[in-house]
Amino acid sequence: MESIAGQIAAANDGVRRQWEIAVEADSIGSDEPYNAMAVLASVLYDQSTDQCLDLADVFAAIERELVAADGRMRNLLIVGLLEDLQNLSMSRGRDPDMWVKWMGPATLAGWRMVERLWSSSVSPADFNAFVDSAAGDISAD
């Protein structure tokens, strides 16, 4: 069975091809979902340097997964993928909000909650409660 990161990558042919190359090079096991999300974040970052690339389909897949996710999967998607995208963007000198244009409401709520955690405007306990909550409880305002 394809990992959730692989399923998200499959939403875009260019991302899928780079994902397959990266997974083969990094030898990610199926029991390493956070590592897989880190690789997906890196692939998305690398793909985003193509100014013509539209990642709407990838973010639509992320949105679908977040909306349907249980707490464990939400944690993987928010902490494992969205936070990694923010960290990659900031550490490589790009504006993390470059991703926002493709986000649906659940993805954006998770994204903003990560920002709030790192700016200390939400406590780690409140962040964890948000991240681990059931699908449908996505308000981050």
Image: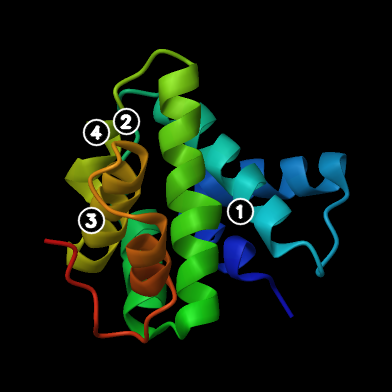
Looking at the rendered structure, the kind of residue marked 1 is Met
C-alpha separation, residue under disc 3 versus residue under disc 2: 12 Å
Left or right: residue 122 versus residue 75 is left
C-alpha separation, residue under disc 4 versus residue under disc 3: 10 Å
Q: Are marks 1 and 2 in contact (CB under 8 Å)?
A: no
Residue 78 visible in the current orientation: yes
User: Secondary structure under badge 4?
Assistant: helix
Left or right: residue 121 versus residue 21 is left
| Mark nearer the N terminus (3 vs 2) | 2
Residue at figure coordinates x 38%, y 73% from the top left: 129
Quadrant in which the C terminus appears: bottom left
Residue 11 visible in the current orientation: no
Give coordinates of residue 45: x percent, y percent. Answer: 48, 32
Q: Residues within 10 Å of mark 4 (few under 14, many from 20)?
A: few
C-alpha separation, residue under disc 2 versus residue under disc 4: 4 Å
C-alpha separation, residue under disc 3 versus residue under disc 1: 17 Å
Residue linked to disc 4: 97
Extreme top residue here?
93
User: Secondary structure under badge 3?
Assistant: helix
Q: Are marks 3 and 2 in contact (CB under 8 Å)?
A: no
Looking at the rendered structure, the kind of residue marked 4 is Asp
User: Secondary structure under badge 2?
Assistant: helix
Residue linked to disc 1: 37
Vertical position of residue 37 compared to residue 54: above or below: below
Q: Are marks 2 and 4 in contact (CB under 8 Å)?
A: yes
| Mark nearer the N terminus (1 vs 2) | 1
Vertical position of residue 136 compared to residue 33: above or below: below
Give coordinates of residue 46: x percent, y percent. Answer: 53, 28
| Mark nearer the N terminus (3 vs 1) | 1
Residue linked to disc 2: 96
Residue linked to disc 3: 108
